[in-house]
Image: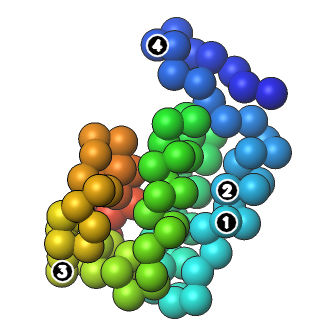
């Protein structure tokens, strides 16, 4: 079930959150640490839009994702198609408090 907040942005439900967590499992421990911190901080408020953007980031290779986490590469260097507002927002959420 999807809940809608006052801004009209739909939050994902528990089942979708569980699937997203499973989808975000990575091969590199460093990526897993960033992602776990993200879920610990934002799991109660992840929207459908943010979940989709996170899914796009999860399509990247582990090394490209780590390069983004560590700001060694930009989104356009990794994949120009990912340079979207939603993806930038989620990447910022992932990299806060590195």
Mark nearer the N terminus (3 vs 4): 4
Give the distance between the C-alpha atoms of the residues marked 3 and 2, in whole angstroms. 25 Å
Which residue corresponds to mark 1?
23
* Residue furthest top in the image: 6
Percent position of residue 56, x then y: 47, 58
Question: CB of mark 3 within 8 Å of CB of mark 4?
Answer: no
Circle 1 packing at 10 Å, graded few (<14), some (14-19), many (20+), is few
Percent position of residue 42, x then y: 53, 47
Question: CB of mark 4 within 8 Å of CB of mark 1?
Answer: no
Give the distance between the C-alpha atoms of the residues marked 2 and 4, in whole angstroms. 23 Å
Q: Is residue 7 above or below residue 38?
A: above
Query: Is label 1 in a helix, a strand or a loop?
Result: helix
What residue appears at the point 23 percent right and 61 percent down from the top-left corner? 80
Circle 4 packing at 10 Å, graded few (<14), some (14-19), many (20+), is few
Which residue corresponds to mark 4?
7
Q: Does residue 61 show up?
A: yes
Mark nearer the N terminus (2 vs 4): 4
Percent position of residue 31, x then y: 47, 79
Which residue corresponds to mark 2?
20
Give the distance between the C-alpha atoms of the residues marked 3 and 1, in whole angstroms. 24 Å
What residue appears at the point 55 percent right and 46 percent down from the top-left corner? 51
Q: Quadrant of the C terminus?
A: bottom left
Mark nearer the N terminus (3 vs 1): 1
Percent position of residue 86, x then y: 36, 42
Q: Does residue 89 show up?
A: no
Give the distance between the C-alpha atoms of the residues marked 4 and 1, in whole angstroms. 27 Å
């Amino acid at each position: 079930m999807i809940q809608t907040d006052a801004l009209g942005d739909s939050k994902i439900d528990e089942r979708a959150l569980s699937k997203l967590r499973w989808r975000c499992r990575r091969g590199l421990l460093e990526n897993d640490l960033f992602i776990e911190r993200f879920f610990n901080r934002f799991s109660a408020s992840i929207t459908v839009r943010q979940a989709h953007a996170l899914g796009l980031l999860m399509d990247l290779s582990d090394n490209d994702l780590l390069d983004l986490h560590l700001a060694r590469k930009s989104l356009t260097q990794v994949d120009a198609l990912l340079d979207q507002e939603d993806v930038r927002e989620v990447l910022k959420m992932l990299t806060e408090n590195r």
